């Protein structure tokens, strides 16, 4: 008879811990956001530019490959089905709308969460373990201003830019498959793509990328700060940051789509 | 200057500090010794509120710091420099940038003034040529000296040293000890040193406090400490081959 009570107690304790963690992460995010007004000050400028370079330029190679192939796969899978009905001319709109509305921001979010987000969690986690965060606090340097804010600014600025880049490359990848495999001319492909994709699709896609940037920074930094147990803890924090970011990106992606299209 | 009033701290169900009270006076070099897990580092962390006590209060210059606002705490922390056990240097910054960090964050000095001050402190610690290096390029002893340069760059009134000689060879350890003594003599800094190394404690301390199982078992001058009648202190002294005359004794039989 002890088991149900113990299980309930354990669940209750886990729920409280979850609420505590979410509250802590939100506090960290809000405080970091409050420091954004100092982003151009001498002491923050350099770190913000470094983070933008890391998130943006250093991610370009992997994003290029993933975006091109995402567009190509989309075009091939959809095009083969459309060809059965003689409608392969619509491949342009299928790829463009999918990329701009969903796949562009989604794929960008996953890549940045896996590459940049995990690196952020590992770096901050290592700083916790090696007492660097404690040293910052003793020097009265707020870690949320010194570490979180530059990463937040870098990701919310770079994510929409990277999402647009992903969209363009994805559509180009689709065009390659459309012209070489499905016999659709580039002109027809582009005409069809621009005819069906609307400004709203672009804005909603950019909104998603912006939100995903906030999610990745918050989750990664928070997991980094929560690191315990030395090197093993850093590994756990890195893994958790990627998993939680993926899940939150999926759920929020669905909710934003539902909010604007249903 | 620093006063602990009935501090209790429980971690993992164990009282790491159990109703601990003591005071560190201005200009003292106060050394805290004890076995691993005795609560030495926890004590140090309470002084700069990196940890909060479960009960009791920590008073710095007459001001209880337990419930201070972040701004007020910042003022209190500005009185401290801390040398962490791992030196805690920011790995992506050069040595000079690490030492300059508090100046860049908290003063309006121009870069020339900052560079001059950083070079001065690095020179004081025999690190004049290390400014452009990164922490990963330095030995453990050099990293600790850089950490010390950073700790004193804002001319704090109090410097806390967490195991300043752990993991260092004996020669480097004695050099760090000399630096701590020099800090007091030349800059009048109050020091609190946490260490396992009794030889170091006896050499640099004006007072030595021993913690054991969350309690203070001895607090005395080095001379009195050596002659302490407390069994834990005696056993601690013997473990490091120190006799009541304060002389080195191997205690090893070669028969």
Image (cartoon, coloured by chain):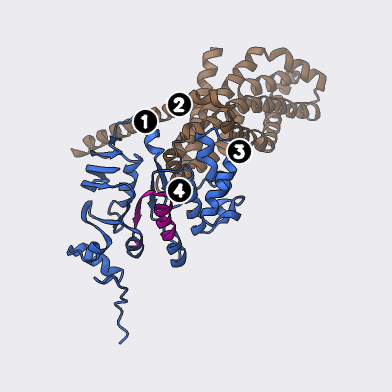
Chain colours: A brown, B blue
Chain ID of residue with mark 3 = B
The CA distance from mark 1 to mark 2 is 18 Å
Chain ID of residue with mark 4 = A
Which numbered disc covers residue B111?
A: 3
The CA distance from mark 1 to mark 4 is 26 Å
Please give left or right for residue B229 compared with residue B67 in the image: left
Indicate whether residue B180 is drawn in magenta: yes
The CA distance from mark 3 to mark 2 is 29 Å
The residue at which mark 2 appears reads as A31
Which numbered disc covers residue A130?
A: 4
**Span highlighted in magenta in the image:** B177-197
Mark 1 or 4, closer to the camera: 1
The residue at which mark 1 appears reads as B72
Same chain under badges 3 and 1? The reply is: yes
The CA distance from mark 4 to mark 2 is 24 Å
Sequence-wise, the earlier of marks 3 and 1 is: 1
Q: Residue at x 21, y 62 (%)?
A: B232
Circle 4 SS class: loop
User: Quarter of the image containing the C terminus of chain B?
Assistant: bottom left
Chain ID of residue with mark 2 = A
> Would you place residue A22 above or below residue B51 in this image?
above
The CA distance from mark 3 to mark 1 is 28 Å
Chain ID of residue with mark 1 = B
Percent coordinates x, y for residue A230 in the rendering: 43, 49
> Would you place residue B179 above or below residue A95 in this image?
below
Percent coordinates x, y for residue B56 in the rendering: 22, 39
Mark 3 or 4, closer to the camera: 3
């Amino acid at each position: 008879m002890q088991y149900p009570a113990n299980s309930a107690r354990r669940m209750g304790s886990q729920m409280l811990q979850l609420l505590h963690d979410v509250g802590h992460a939100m506090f960290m995010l809000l405080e970091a956001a409050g420091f954004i007004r100092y982003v151009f000050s001498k002491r923050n400028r350099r770190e913000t530019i470094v983070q933008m370079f890391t998130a943006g330029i250093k991610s370009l190679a992997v994003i290029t490959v993933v975006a091109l192939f995402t567009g190509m796969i989309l075009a091939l899978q959809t095009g083969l089905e459309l060809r059965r009905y003689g409608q392969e001319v619509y491949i342009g709109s299928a790829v463009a709308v999918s990329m701009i509305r969903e796949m562009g921001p989604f794929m960008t979010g996953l890549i940045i969460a896996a590459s940049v987000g995990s690196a952020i969690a590992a770096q901050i986690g290592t700083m916790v373990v090696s007492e660097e965060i404690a040293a910052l606090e003793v020097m009265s340097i707020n870690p949320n201003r010194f570490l979180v804010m530059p990463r937040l600014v870098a990701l919310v600025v770079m994510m929409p830019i990277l999402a647009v880049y992903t969209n363009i490359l994805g559509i180009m990848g689709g065009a390659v498959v459309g012209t070489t495999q499905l016999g659709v001319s580039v002109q027809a492909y582009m005409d069809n793509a621009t005819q069906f994709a609307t400004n709203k699709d672009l804005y909603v896609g950019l909104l998603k990328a912006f939100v995903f940037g906030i999610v990745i920074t918050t989750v990664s930094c928070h997991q980094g700060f929560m690191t315990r147990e030395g090197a093993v803890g850093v590994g756990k924090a890195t893994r958790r940051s990627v998993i939680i970011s993926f899940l939150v990106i999926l759920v929020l992606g669905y909710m934003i789509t539902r909010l604007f299209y249903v | 200057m620093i006063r602990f009033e009935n501090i209790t701290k429980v971690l993992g169900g164990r009282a790491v500090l159990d109703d601990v009270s003591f005071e560190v006076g201005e200009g003292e070099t106060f050394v805290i010794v004890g076995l691993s897990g005795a609560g030495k580092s926890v004590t140090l962390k309470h002084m700069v509120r990196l940890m909060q006590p479960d009960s009791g209060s920590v008073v710095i210059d007459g001001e209880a710091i337990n419930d201070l606002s972040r701004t007020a705490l910042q003022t209190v922390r500005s009185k401290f420099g801390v040398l962490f056990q791992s030196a805690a240097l920011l790995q992506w910054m050069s040595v000079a940038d690490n030492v300059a960090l508090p100046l860049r964050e908290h003063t309006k000095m121009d870069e020339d003034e900052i560079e001059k001050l950083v070079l001065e402190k690095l020179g004081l610690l025999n690190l004049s040529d290390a400014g452009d290096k990164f922490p990963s390029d330095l030995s453990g002893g050099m990293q600790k000296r850089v950490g010390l340069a950073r700790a004193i760059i804002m001319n704090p009134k109090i410097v806390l040293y967490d195991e300043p000689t752990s993991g260092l060879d004996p020669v480097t350890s004695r050099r760090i000890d000399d630096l701590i003594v020099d800090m007091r003599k030349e800059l009048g800094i109050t020091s609190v040193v946490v260490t396992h190394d009794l030889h170091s404690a006896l050499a640099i301390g004006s007072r030595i406090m021993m913690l054991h199982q969350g309690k203070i078992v001895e607090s005395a001058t080095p001379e009195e400490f050596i002659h302490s009648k407390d069994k834990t202190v005696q056993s601690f002294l013997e473990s490091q081959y120190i006799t009541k005359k304060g002389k080195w004794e191997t205690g090893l039989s070669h028969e």
